[in-house]
Amino acid sequence: MEIRIEGNNYINETDCVICGKEFTFDVVNPVLYDDDGFVWGVCPDCLKLTPGEMKKQFLQRIEEIDFLIDNLKSYRERYNRYIKEDINTPTFAEFEKAIKERRVEA
């Protein structure tokens, strides 16, 4: 894995592979290439980090991703349960009537 400085033909916003923060991918950028040839943008702040500090950032990103995965699994389980349950719901007309009357029954 290596980080190279490369030119770019356009300017856009992207997320840094190291810290995850959005930054402007400009006409000259630090770019990370992994062993599979996958290319990632690296923000200027992360380019200032030592390789050891970059690895700590990657560990932090892994923890964030694991948290998101756990949350997504929870949502998936909940949605799977919802599709198996009956849904009792007021009609849209009842909703509109409640808005007009500005009242909600508990």
Image: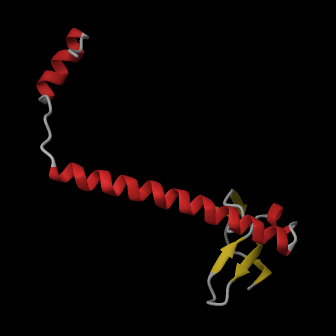
* Residue 26 drawn at (x, y percent): 74, 66
- At 20% from the left and 16% from the top, the residue drawn is 98
Compare residues 37 and 29 and report the one nearer the observer: 37
Image quarter of the C terminus: top left
- At 65% from the left and 63% from the top, the residue drawn is 61
- Left or right? Give the position of 42 relative to 61: right
* Residue 79 drawn at (x, y percent): 28, 52
* Residue 41 drawn at (x, y percent): 69, 71
Compare residues 80 and 34 and report the one nearer the observer: 80
As drawn, 44 above or below 96: below
As drawn, 78 above or below 33: above
* Residue 30 drawn at (x, y percent): 78, 74
Q: Quadrant of residue 77?
A: bottom left
Image quarter of the N terminus: bottom right
- At 26% from the left and 11% from the top, the residue drawn is 102
Q: Quadrant of residue 7?
A: bottom right
Compare residues 51 and 20 and report the one nearer the observer: 51
- Left or right? Give the position of 7 relative to 101: right
- At 14% from the left and 40% from the top, the residue drawn is 87
